[in-house]
């Protein structure tokens, strides 16, 4: 699985609060293989949504069709996100 950073302005249709949930790891923004007609998927705590190139919700993924294989995960590079535990451990060792 590939991790990607994108700028929040690349998906203007997604609200900032949703982008913050993605960066906190509460929700997932991803691409799935074999689904070229959908730009992105957004997985919330209860649903998965298909998104356009601008982040507009196209439709909710029906139950039973939600077995998607995540190829790429996306985070917003210009919004805050917590440092991982492994990052803080490495920082302590380096300093």
Image (cartoon, helix red, strand yellow):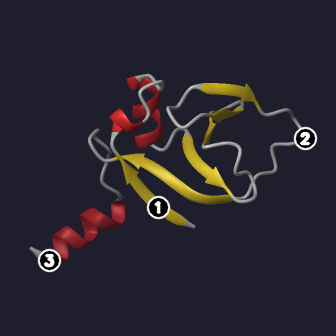
- For label 2, the SS is loop
Choose between 81 and 7: the one closer to the eye: 7
Query: Dot 3 corresponds to which residue?
Result: 94
Q: Residue at x 72, y 31 (%)?
A: 47
Q: Earlier in the sequence, mark 1 or mark 3?
A: 1
Q: Is residue 39 above or below residue 93?
A: above
Q: Which residue corresponds to the image point at 43% horizontal and 57% vertical from the top-left?
A: 4
**In front: 77, or 22?**
77
| Residues tagged 3 and 2 counted as in contact (Cβ below 8 A) | no
As drawn, the residue found furthest toward the bottom would be: 94
Residue contact at pointers 1 and 3, CB within 8 angstroms: no
Q: Earlier in the sequence, mark 1 or mark 2?
A: 1
The crowd level at tag 1 (other Cα within 10 Å; few <14, some 14-19, many 20+) is few
Closest to the camera, between mark 1 and mark 3, is 1
Instruction: Tell me the tag on residue 3.
Output: 1
User: Which residue, given by chain and number where applicable, does mark 2 sit on?
Assistant: 64
Where residue 63 sits: x, y (%)?
87, 35
Q: Quadrant of the C terminus?
A: bottom left
Whether residue 28 sits left or right of residue 89 in the image: it is right
């Amino acid at each position: 699985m590939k991790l990607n950073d994108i700028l929040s302005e690349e998906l203007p249709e997604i609200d900032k609060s949703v982008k913050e949930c993605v960066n906190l790891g509460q929700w997932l923004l991803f691409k799935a293989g074999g689904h070229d007609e959908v730009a992105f998927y957004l997985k919330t705590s209860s649903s998965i949504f298909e998104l356009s190139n601008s982040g507009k919700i196209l439709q909710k993924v029906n139950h039973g069709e939600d077995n998607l294989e995540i190829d790429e995960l996306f985070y917003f590079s210009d919004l805050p996100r917590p440092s991982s535990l492994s990052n803080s451990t490495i920082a302590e060792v380096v300093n």
